[in-house]
Amino acid sequence: MKRSASQEGQISRRAIIGYGAGDFGLNLFYTGLNLYLLFYYTDVAGLNPALAGGIFMVSLLWDAVTDPLMGLIASRTNTRFGRYRPYILFASPLLGASFVLMFAAPVFWPAHAALACLVTHLLFRTIYTIVGVPIAALSAAMTTSGRTRASLAGARMQFATLGAIVTAFLTPLLAGSLGGEDLALGYMLTAILYALVAEVVLLIAFASVREHVEIDAETPDLGATLNVLKANTAFWILFAVVVTNTIASTIFTKSIVYYARYVIGEPGAVREALTLYTLAAAAAILAWTQLARLRSKAFTLFCGLAINTIAYLLLYLSVHRCLLVHAPRHGRVWPVEDRSS
């Protein structure tokens, strides 16, 4: 049987760039949520921090349910656009609208702000899954070439990093500029701007790619998979490492805005800090890739975790020292705002 050019690995540069660009659009949403939404909930919308954190926890648990379910649904989809591309075309406008609603919820429904934030957050996570999971799976339907799939993954990573840098740097700047004294309005207008840009980019991604490879929709044997994992010690070690590192990373990214605002006393510093953090992560990708080629993946993982541990320890010591310096002078570091008025 004659194989297509795409199955042999010949995909145009336009398709590779278009596919990667989709992650730029997704990261306008995801980075805004990951870095600034918790701060928006607590300091702009006025939610109790524990309640705001609970909204994130429920939403992440919801993700754990919807992600595999969406993978199953997408693999069984069969349309003239393919299995995965229709979700990019039809769900991306809903994704932008749900992103705006997350920031608009406490403005439109101030009397029920917590419930509105929870519902709109769950809605956004659901639609993000509907778009994000098919995009992640799309490369397998574009080509069977491992080398070309690696190029597609590299393009995704590069555009995702660019989207993260843009969002980390521009979000506080745009929110302050567009909203003036009204930060809630500023964040909502920023969300609208991101939604419009992301929609254009995702439509470009849809138009740039084609599905050339027929993938069999197989239902995995969950019991057999679990039995294999039970005896796989290496998997559980890696699982524990990933979970621990994710917890540490989440604590860092969610708290850095508060650290800059209430400990350092420089709210504007968060923009530079998060931008440098994202740039450092992007530069590190090349260094870690090269180290993995020269040594081994296990050695590279160990080095990365060691550097992470030292960096977080130094950050803790610097915060501790800052608290010792400022607490006696000001009585408390975290301000308590009067929201009764």
Image (cartoon, rainbow, N blue to C red):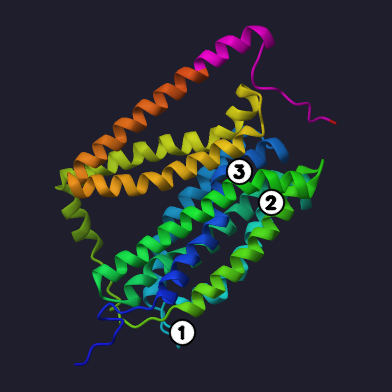
Expressed as whole percent of the image width and height from the top left, the position of residue 242 reads 32, 42
Q: Secondary structure at mark 1?
A: loop
Disc ID at residue 149: none
Magenta residues (range): 320-340
- Image point 64% across, 18% down: which residue? 333
On the question of residue 106 being in view, the answer is no
The answer to whether residue 329 is magenta is yes
Quadrant of res 198:
bottom right
Work out whether 265 lies above or below 221.
Answer: above
Find numbered disc 2 in the image and state the secondary structure of the residue it sits on: helix
Dot 3: what SS? Answer: helix
Residue under label 3 = 36
- Could you tell me residue 38's position as x and y percent? 60, 41
Nearest the eye: 213 or 78: 213
The residue type indicated by label 3 comes to Tyr
Report the residue at 51% width, 38% height from top: 253
In depth, the one of 91 and 31 nearer the eye is 31
Q: Earlier in the sequence, mark 3 or mark 1?
A: 3
The residue to which callout 2 is attached is: 103
Of 9 and 134, the residue lying toward us? 9
Can you see residue 96?
A: yes
Dots 3, 1 in contact, CB < 8 A: no
The residue pinned by badge 1 equals 81
Quadrant in the picture for the N terminus: bottom left
The location of residue 82, given as percent across then percent down, is 42, 82
Please identify the residue farthest to the left as the structure is shown: 231
